[in-house]
Image (cartoon, rainbow, N blue to C red):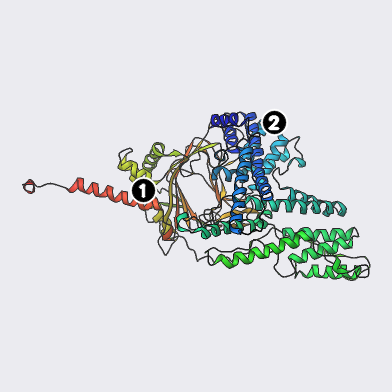
Amino acid sequence: MMRTFLIILSLCSIQCEEVLKPFDLLYEEGIQAYYRNDWEGVVHYMEEATRSYAQHKSIKVQCRLQCEKQHEFQEAAEPNLIFFAVILRRAHCIQECESRRMGPPSMYRVSEEVAREFQKRIVYNYLQLAYYKLKELDKAAAAAHTFFQANPEHMEMRQNLERYKLMKGVKESHFVDQDMRPYMVAFSTGMKHYDEEQYALAIDSFEEALTQYWVAETECRAFCQGPQEFDGNNYPAKSFHLYELITDHYIQVLQCEHDCMRELATRAGRLSPIENYLPMHYDFLQYSYYKVGNYEKALEATKSYLLIRPTDEDMLENLEYYQSVLQSQMDMNQIAPRQELVWFMDRYQLEKELLQSVSSELRFVYVDPINWTVSGTKHENPDHPKRRLPGEEESLKEPEMPTSQKRKVERKVPQQRQEGGPLLYDRVKLVYDSQQMNGSQRVLLDDVITAQECHELFHLASSITLAGDGYRGKMSPHTPNERFEGATVYKALVYGYEGRIPLHRARLFYDVSEKARKIIQSYFMLNSTLYFSYTHLVCRTAIEGQQDNRNDLSHPIHADNCLLDPDANECWKEPPAYTYRDYSAILYLNGDFEGGEFIFTEIDAKTITASVKPQCGRMVGFSSGEENPHGVKAVTKGQRCAVALWFTLDPLFRELERIQADEVVELISLAERLDDKLIINPRDEL
């Protein structure tokens, strides 16, 4: 792959600009350097990868905006043909611009998996360890902080940050979010000056934040012009006529552009946008301008704020005050809301009406990306007292920074849950119930399988598990310090049926998972059938030479059917979470390794409520929701193997491979019956 890239570079050297190196290739080189303990190589390639990633996005945006400006739509006698000609010219312009700066399209079409890793800033996890190994603690602290901002549930990085703060030479100023968006940096600086009552400096920063925000908003919308793959829009092209195809793609692009206002207000790693993010700029500006005596600008900011939130009672009072002060000096109509915001709100309203009007016809749900125009007053905050104007009885309301935004969703009333039902099998022992494990819908059981069965399944794992199986082919999906291998029950049975592994071991895997399902269904006293959602034989192996000073997790804290948001103390039950999962269980096959304890935490992802040390035949079972965040501590020596099981009460989400496994078992049973019972009578042959 790298050789191909170098050949392309040489071919382009005469006719192309300097071609951008693909960030996914640089990232892969960095990972390989990590496994070689080449820390300088890790820093070189990962830093280059982050720069390439940023430039990749920037080039795409620049090319699209540049080509849009070069080839504008003009009125003409034949609008359809002219329109199509402009579209063709733009397409050619963008392709030529991107290819000139990034090489052929095949070089920068990155897999979804790699793109997700860059969005989650995984590259900074590698960088912080490499810088630590190189004793560049200031850079290590910055990389750790940057990674943690996008991964607030990452308990080990939280611990790393605490350690860095205690290290000699590490200063508070080193903890910088290196990927923080410029407009958010400027707003954060403005808030710092505002809190210090340096209002002139606060004004400069807030104004810079708005300038940068509008730049980012333009770029965000331009980036939406790329390929779209929204749910429900992946029909074969032949099923559409021309206008349906155009409409389908345009609506997807429009949805993406419309959602930019939400995207820009959401910090990295968070699911919820900052409440009233854009309105806050005008709120803090109006008060800062008031404090420096510039009432005209204060009134302008006030009117701008009210353009977004017209019923805000506090701001309406401020409006009356400014108008009363200025009415003898000028015409109030001369002071209008800021023009860029007027245009923004007009466009927002038009897009909203269009998307709402076609949502039912095109079968998609319109979700308003903002809640800025919600009526009502602001809540009083005892930490922000109202400030009175000198000599005035009426008070001017000072803006307040909101607490973390909670998404406005209706909570489902949890069904009545029970536990303590029969364990069904004589040997199985109850070790701890929910109360003893400091939670709800939790159970710890021993002797679910025998030592011999553990031995058989452990050997089965060593013979059929593949690196990355169950993890989209990734050898180390959760931590680079361990190797993950897995296999499904269907794969085991097929291998057994084909004679590639001992059939009795494959059948044991199937039977043991069924035994675990029956125990969970019975113990939690479920009134309906519990179906398999996913069944996985998985091993985690500590990679030798990478365990020194290790404090990460083998599996980060998470919940099985919702997206954990520790900052908001919420768990959002929405994709890509497996929202249909209802119960989970892990059946351990061995305990002869170091580390690897299973832990439950509070929803903050850091307060441990219970810890389970794996051993042969031990099984932990629990409900899959926000009440049971959990993870796995680092496996620092040896190999940890277990059967992981997820269940659902909804038959629509039954595991497809389980149904296939059932069919294989029927074939095996039929073959065994034929072998045992088919006795040919010699007379029947006559």
First-in-chain label (2 vs 1): 2
Residue 666, can we see it? Answer: yes
Q: Which mark is residue 480?
A: none
- At x 69%, y 37%, the residue is 140
Give amino acid for label 2.
Lys
- Is residue 240 shown left or right of residue 131? left
Q: Position of residue 39 (x, y in %)?
A: 63, 30
Q: Quadrant of residue 324?
A: bottom right
Q: Position of residue 565 (x, y in %)?
A: 62, 54
Residue 120, can we see it? Answer: no
Say which element carries label 2. loop
**Which residue corresponds to mark 2?**
135
Say which element carries label 1. helix
Identify the residue at the far front of this view: 77
- At x 42%, y 65%, the residue is 527
Q: Residues within 10 Å of mark 1 (few under 14, many from 20)?
A: many
Q: Residues within 10 Å of mark 2 (few under 14, many from 20)?
A: few
Q: Which mark is residue 510?
A: 1
Distance between the Cα atoms at labels 2 and 1? Answer: 50 Å
Give amino acid for label 1.
Tyr
- Is residue 372 shown left or right of residue 487? right
Please tell me which residue lies in front, 3 or 265.
Answer: 3
- At x 71%, y 70%, the residue is 375
Q: Position of residue 119 (x, y in %)?
A: 61, 46
Please tell me which residue lies in front, 158 or 316.
Answer: 316
